[in-house]
Image: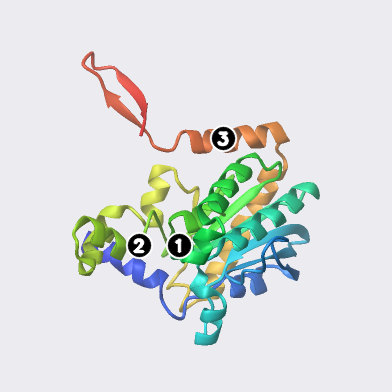
Amino acid sequence: MSETNTAWQKVKLARHPKRPTSQYLIKELFTDFIELHGDRGFGDDYAIIGGIGTINSIPVTIIAEEKGVTTEEKIRHNFGMPHPEGYRKAIRLMKQAEKFNRPIICIIDTPGAYPGIGAEERGQAQAIAYNLKTMMGLKTPIIVVVLSEGGSGGALAIGVGDQVLMFENSIYAILSPEGYASIIYKDSSKADHAASIMKLTAQDLLGFGVIDTIVPENEGLHIDPDFGIKALKKELTKSITKLSKLSTSKLLDQRYQKYRKMGVFVEQGEDNESKPTNG
């Protein structure tokens, strides 16, 4: 299989109609889940599900982007594209988690933040930026899981984590391959080629240090979800245990260093000395 087909196949697997959504993961992973609603400012956004639960008897806060399964659910959840009130609900629950010293688990599954006029009027860009800033300083462990599709700022708004886990057939990129092809080639039908050069697979991003762990899927989450969920539960438990042992100062410093070094590459100077450069 060519590189192009490999990347594009992963895009199609990430979007497979039978691939489990966040609701399924929450049901299988967390006992006693209690959903909490609203941003205390405008309304409740069903594209983001938030609440508290336990995993292996450990209390955690869960923030998840939800696309829905049936047509009715997809409309209700806006196809997983959050509005600003969704991101404000998310950060409200994260601050609550910090107050009660609960680890935060964020599940990413979105093609991107909703770009509608109403969302922009209510401060979509500001909500995303505020989440990025606030998450960098939260004094509790944050673990991010890329379930299927992580698109642009819509994903990044809940994507700042001490550990970032990614299912092996999920994708994570600045925009969709179709969007990339439309901008670069003026032809969205070249999305398969765009996917091959965007470096959006779990394998690519692990090599760049953008993610920390690839969660195996066996034949794929749409075929054998139990295998992947069992593997994810193991990784989540390991990450929570590891991060919970760190002091607050160490946790924040490691988080800062993790994101500070992203985009750094080595440039060879005329004197043949390697010089680190921020990209």
- Residue sitting farthest toward the right: 100
Amino acid carrying mark 1 in the image: Gly
Tell me which numbered mark, 2 or 3, is placed earlier along the sequence. Answer: 2
Which residue sits at x=25%, y=57%?
Answer: 183
Label 3's element?
helix
Question: Do the CB atoms of the residues marked 1 and 2 lie less than 8 Å apart?
Answer: yes
Residue at label 1?
A: 112
Mark 2, Cα crowd under 10 Å, few <14 / some 14-19 / many 20+, is many
Looking at the rendered structure, the number of numbered marks drawn on it comes to: 3
Amino acid type of the residue tagged 3 in the rendering? Tyr
Inspect the image, locate mark 2, and give the three-letter code of the amino acid beneath it: Ser
Instruction: Report whether 18 appears left or right of 271.
Output: right
Q: Residue at x 67, y 67 (%)?
A: 43
Gap in angstroms between the C-alphas marked 3 and 1:
25 Å
Q: Which label is found at residue 256?
A: 3
- Secondary structure at numbered mark 2: loop
Q: Position of residue 105 (x, y in %)?
A: 64, 57
Residue placed under numbered mark 2 in the picture: 176
Q: Earlier in the sequence, mark 3 or mark 1?
A: 1
